[in-house]
Image: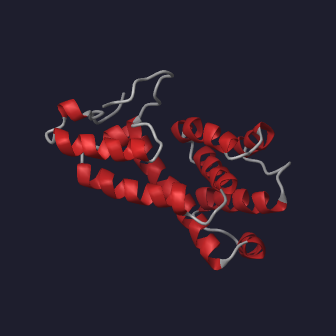
Amino acid sequence: MARLRYVTPADSPDRERMEHIYSQIRGMGRRVNHLYQILANQPAALEAFLSMSRYIRDDSSLRPALREMAILATAEALHQPYEIAHHRPAALQAGVTPEKIDSILAGETHGLAPVERAVVTYALQVAQERKVDDTAFEELRSFFSDAEIADLVLTVAWYHLCAAVLGPLRVELEVDGARDVS
């Protein structure tokens, strides 16, 4: 059971603000999921969270498939089934094959192209050790510009932050067919 309540506009002290925030989430093509609803206990924090989330998911220079591979590797290494459940479909939509997803979720890199292996290796090392070795970092340099590396670093770090919210607050996975809050 979640440690904080899932906020809907109807039970928010500022219904109008919450309706506006939730409308923005839908405008980004997303559902108002439990992660957003639990962060809505502090609306200003949710708004700040959404700003960075929008950058990571929509404006980053990383190709969507590589972004999703980094997210899945991070989520698996940090034991976050919530993120896996949300990003497995996103990875498929971005063109990642089910076989590659299975490999990543097994903590492996076999069957991945060299650039994909470099991304997943980076994400796994950061999750396991909070650092990355020189070999893995130089491998990234062979594929990415400095700006793209910065975006990869921010993406992996962002999903560490998400794990640090999801776990302690015990955010529950939405059940299939769960209604969107309005």
Q: Quadrant of the C terminus?
A: top left
The correct choice, above or below, for 135 with respect to 12 in the image is: below
74 horizontally vs 31: left or right: right
- Please state the horizontal and vertical placement of residue 156, each as a whole percent of the image: 57, 59
| x 66%, y 41%: residue | 93
Comparing 20 with 35, the one in front is: 20
Q: Quadrant of the N terminus?
A: top left
- Please state the horizontal and vertical placement of residue 142, each as a whole percent of the image: 78, 75
| x 53%, y 62%: residue | 59
Q: Is residue 164 visible?
A: yes
- Please state the horizontal and vertical placement of residue 24, each as a whole percent of the image: 35, 47
145 horizontally vs 172: left or right: right
Most extreme residue toward the left, as rendered? Answer: 13
The correct choice, above or below, for 95 with respect to 60 in the image is: above
- Please state the horizontal and vertical placement of residue 60, each as a whole percent of the image: 56, 63
26 horizontally vs 75: left or right: left
Q: Is residue 170 visible?
A: no
| x 64%, y 63%: residue | 62
Most extreme residue toward the front, as rendered? Answer: 27
